[in-house]
Amino acid sequence: MIASGTSVNGVELGVVLFFFVVVTIGGFLAARWRRTEKLHSLDEWGLGGRGFGSVVTWFLLGGDLYTAYTFVAVPAAMFATGAVAGFFAVPYTIVAYPIVFVFLPRLWSVAQARGYVTPADFVRGRYGSRSLATAVALTGILATMPYIALQLVGIQAVLDTMGLGGTGGWFERDLPLIIAFAVLAAYTYSSGLRAPALIAFVKDTLIYIVIVVAIVYVGAKIGFGDMFDAAKGKMTKVVNGKPTGAFTTSEATYWAYGSLAFGSALALFMYPHSMTAVLASRRRSVIRRNTAILPAYSLMLALLALLGFAAIYEVGQGKMNVFGQDGKANAQLAVPHFFQAVFPSWFAGVAFAAITIGALVPAAIMSIAAANLFTRNVYREFFRPNASPKQEAQVSKIVSLVVKFGALLFVLGLDKQNALNMQLLGGVWILQTIVAIVAGLYTRWFDRWALLLGWAAAMAWGTITAYQQKVPNVVLRQGVAKPEVHGVRHFGSSIADFPFTHTKFYIAVSALIINVVVAVVLTLVLRAMKVAGGVDETQPEDYYSDAPDENVVREATREVAGVEAGVNDPPPPR
């Protein structure tokens, strides 16, 4: 049985180090991959030259959306509280793709035509509003930071399982994590988006191999019937007058489950890292093709989620537990401990390498996306309006380092629960940008100030409501039969009563409804008052374009070459 205080498993560690060295070499070599010029612009460093085809985009988006934390947290939620908290991730990733199939090609086209690097660039150009664009940019940065931190939580779960990082002084305990992120920062700084795009091939291949082998094991050695019986037994067990969890959804949880899945689907591609991977594509047809085939990852996620139930079975058989090196129960250890308990050390090492690399790929993309937002929509907008592409790229590189190490300090300095709380808020926050972005792709009816006030009202209501959700702060220690209760903690759930009802609903969707209502009402009021609506710099044909505007290309080429705008124009082609 796995228990806290175990020694370091040399075989597992050796396999993880091997793959870590492989992806590190690949990350640095990526600087030379498909490069047409030096990485002195955000188009090249931050968007990979906007030249990724269907295969690269598929791996990049898969590596971006299905993160290490996904592979640790989804089974962990299934293990701890059952289907409502865990399995909703499967339908939401399926529902998301038909939705984004409709609007993402339009966003890609207008960004390609106008040279936009971030969704906030589009908002700035569409509405002529610096304030609204800044709100979208800052929301994206705030929502991304805890997402990066949670990738570290996934790595910590692997290190803890291998016997690293659980005891000793802070430096000894956290050194492996610090080294991993330092190396990640180095090759991301050097290669930009090309680094995670290249190593995503390794990550996704390992994940597929690991999941297929694990499911074959479950079917052959455990049996799906026995697995589900064990899970049902745990979830229906009454503790303190309440069931442990939900084996399946019930009438009382339909709205909570449905709104959580639907809201998460809407939010998925509002995150800056998702947008960055999309805008790096070569053509709009690449976007449509990928939204059609990416659900293959959702099938993999469904199989992965079942490993949470498989872990319940193995715990019942006495083969494993979820106590960490610190002696505390931690559901995030369910999958790593499962692999260590039932597979040879070398294959458990492969699984741990897949999770670790699965953290590095999205963390790199997220830091690049956050840096692009800061550079384009804060630094250039407020501090240096005439910044050259080279200066933008340099600032973005530096900010990406700050973002990574900020996330590292956040995880090392605070309790893991704080990272989880911030991620809950991140989902509430990022969904509030959908009105300005997606509505703007189809209409200019909304007033820019109405959108800004709708965003502010939803952000305030969503944050306060999330804070008000309290749950007991329970700690279960190894060898102690009775759980310890240390008061209550806020941000205990992403579900709350829908306003003026007793129906449980996803907080982010409730906030979005408030956002839309405020934006519609104020738009009608401001239009009646004949308030100026701002200048729209886009053209109708931009939303169907499959090539950049010639004037945008010529201006960008001049700036990258260091030539002053408007001087020494290149001769027209003959």
Image (spheres, rainbow, N blue to C red):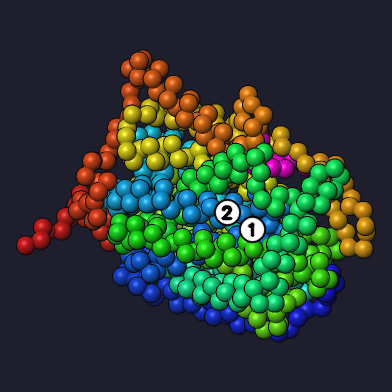
Type of secondary structure dominating the magenta stretch:
loop
The secondary structure type at the circle numbered 1 is helix
Asked which quadrant contains residue 41, the reply is: bottom left
Determine the residue located farthest toward the front in the rendered image: 225
**Foreground: 322 or 33?**
322
> Percent x, y for residue 452?
46, 30
In this picture, is 448 found above or below 424?
A: above
Q: Which mark is residue 74?
A: 1
Determine the residue located farthest toward the left in the rendered image: 574
Q: Which mark is residue 89?
A: 2
**Foreground: 557 or 263?**
263
Relative side of 101 to 188, left or right: left
- Tell me, yes or no, whether the two marked residues, 1 and 2, touch with CB atoms within 8 Å: yes
At label 1, which amino acid type do we have? Val
> Percent x, y for residue 534?
32, 29
Q: Which residues are magenta?
A: 489-496
